[in-house]
Amino acid sequence: MFAKSVLSTDLDRLVAARSRLFDCLGPAGVVSASLIAADFSMVDRVANAIGISVEPMVMGPSEDFRERLGINEFPSAANTFGAT
């Protein structure tokens, strides 16, 4: 729930997810999860900015879990995966 809300533009959804995460893991859990999400976003943006794309040998084997996890729907997927 938290990971999806971070990628969403729905502030209410993010606040609810952050509150639930706080209830389950406490303040350190919220900070850790937020740092992980921010780091992933930063690395992804850097890779996109310098033109790194996913290698063809990774595309096939990762297809099933990219679909299951919704990775192909991330806005940056258009840059990283090309037309999916």
Image (cartoon, rainbow, N blue to C red):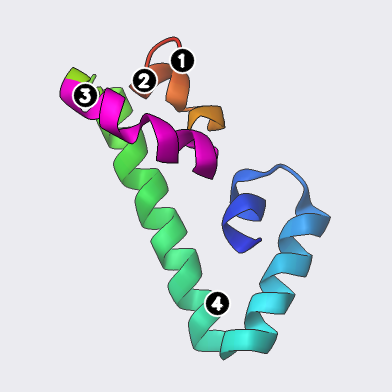
Q: Is 6 on the left-hand or right-hand side of 69?
A: right
Q: Gap between marks 2 and 3, in whole Å?
A: 10 Å
Residue for badge 2? 81
What's the residue type where badge 1 is placed?
A: Thr
Residue found farthest to the right: 12
Q: Earlier in the sequence, mark 2 or mark 4?
A: 4
What's the residue type where badge 2 is placed?
A: Phe
Establish if 78 lies above or below 72: above
Q: Earlier in the sequence, mark 1 or mark 4?
A: 4
- Residue 9 percent coordinates (x, y): 72, 42
SS at badge 2: loop
SS at badge 1: loop
Q: Earlier in the sequence, mark 3 or mark 4?
A: 4
Which residues are the magenta region? 57-71
Establish if 46 lies above or below 32: above
| Labelled pair 1, 4 in contact (Cβ < 8 Å) | no
Residue 6 lies in the magenta-colored region:
no
What's the residue type where badge 4 is placed?
A: Val
Establish if 80 lies above or below 9: above
Q: Gap between marks 2 and 1, in whole Å?
A: 6 Å
Q: Gap between marks 1 and 4, in whole Å?
A: 32 Å
Q: Is 66 on the left-hand or right-hand side of 54?
A: right
Give the residue drawn at x 36%, y 20%: 81
SS at badge 3: loop
Which dot marks residue 30? 4
| Labelled pair 2, 1 in contact (Cβ < 8 Å) | yes
Q: How many discs mark residues in the rendered view?
A: 4
Residue for badge 1? 84
